[in-house]
Image: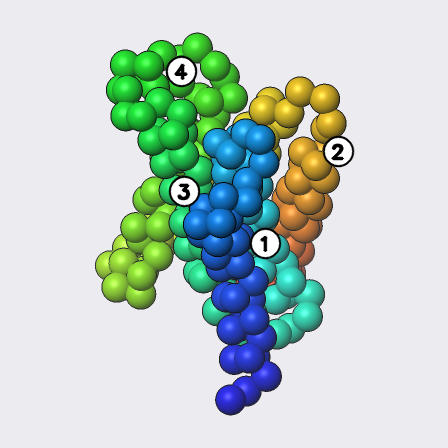
């Protein structure tokens, strides 16, 4: 087994740990005084963490030159969606117990819920088209579609910011991380454009 294969398994186990911990705490009853809030916070924070890690893979691959890192991106993205589903189910089942009318009112009345729902809906098509078969079918459109992950990153960070009432340190860290990632992407795009301009034949049409 290669070192990268071992590393990939470690990342997989680390991403699964919060879910395993929630299962363990469910059976042992070792929750805080407000278990619904605890589950909501745990699943939401984990989903956002893994979403940011997903966005970090490509810059890290380009900086380090380790192309095999790209094989982590789909796994991290699907784990982010998995925890987003748990986060959503907590709201649907434990908060509202499938009360559709109340849930619809909640989405309309509370902006942070609106953004949370928006983030989830953005992640759904990304998860559904993450297979090798869908990549082949969509071709170039796959890349265009999966740029929605950056929009989902922004809405997720704002959602987490609006949820917080006092301590904004964590949302600020996520916002800073996104700014750095967007800055890297902008810099890389400018470098690529500059390189293609320098190598373009003199009489090639624009």
| Residue at (26% x, 64% y) in the render | 133
Decide if residue 206 is in sight here: no
The quarter holding residue 197 reads bottom right
Tag shown at residue 169: 2
Place of residue 86 in the rendered image (x, y in percent of width and height, measured from the top left): 41, 42
Q: Is residue 170 placed above or below 191 in the rendered structure?
A: above
Place of residue 7 in the rendered image (x, y in percent of width and height, measured from the top left): 58, 75
Q: Earlier in the sequence, mark 2 or mark 3?
A: 3
Q: Which residue is mark 1?
A: 53
Badge 3 crowding class, 10 Å Cα cut-off, few under 14, some 14 to 19, many 20 or more, is some
Q: Earlier in the sequence, mark 4 or mark 1?
A: 1
Badge 4 crowding class, 10 Å Cα cut-off, few under 14, some 14 to 19, many 20 or more, is some
Q: Is residue 125 left or right of residue 1?
A: left
- Is there a contact, CB below 8 Å, between mark 4 and mark 2? no
Q: Residue furthest front?
A: 28
- Is there a contact, CB below 8 Å, between mark 2 and mark 3? no
Image depth: mark 3 or mark 1 in front: 3
Spatial CA distance of label 2 from label 3 is 24 Å
Tag shown at residue 86: 3
Q: Which residue is mark 4?
A: 106
Q: Residue furthest bottom?
A: 1
Decide if residue 105 is in sight here: yes
Q: Is residue 2 placed above or below 29 in the rendered structure?
A: below
């Amino acid at each position: 087994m290669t070192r990268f294969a071992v590393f990939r398994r470690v990342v997989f186990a680390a991403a699964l740990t919060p879910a395993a911990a929630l299962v363990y705490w469910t059976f042992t009853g070792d929750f805080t005084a407000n278990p619904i809030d605890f589950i909501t916070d745990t699943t939401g924070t984990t989903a956002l963490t893994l979403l940011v890690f997903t966005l970090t893979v490509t810059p890290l691959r380009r900086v380090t030159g380790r192309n095999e890192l790209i094989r982590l991106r789909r796994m991290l993205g699907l784990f982010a969606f998995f925890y987003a589903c748990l986060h959503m189910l907590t709201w649907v089942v434990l908060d509202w117990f499938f009360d559709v009318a109340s849930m619809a009112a909640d989405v309309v009345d509370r902006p942070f819920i609106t953004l949370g729902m928006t983030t989830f809906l953005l992640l759904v098509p990304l998860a559904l088209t993450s297979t090798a078969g869908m990549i082949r079918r969509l071709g170039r459109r796959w890349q265009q579609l999966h740029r929605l992950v950056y929009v989902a990153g922004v809405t997720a960070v704002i959602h987490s910011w609006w949820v917080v009432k006092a301590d904004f340190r964590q949302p600020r860290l996520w916002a800073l991380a996104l700014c750095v990632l967007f800055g890297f992407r902008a810099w890389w795009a400018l470098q690529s454009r500059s390189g293609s301009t320098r190598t373009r034949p003199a009489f090639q049409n624009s």
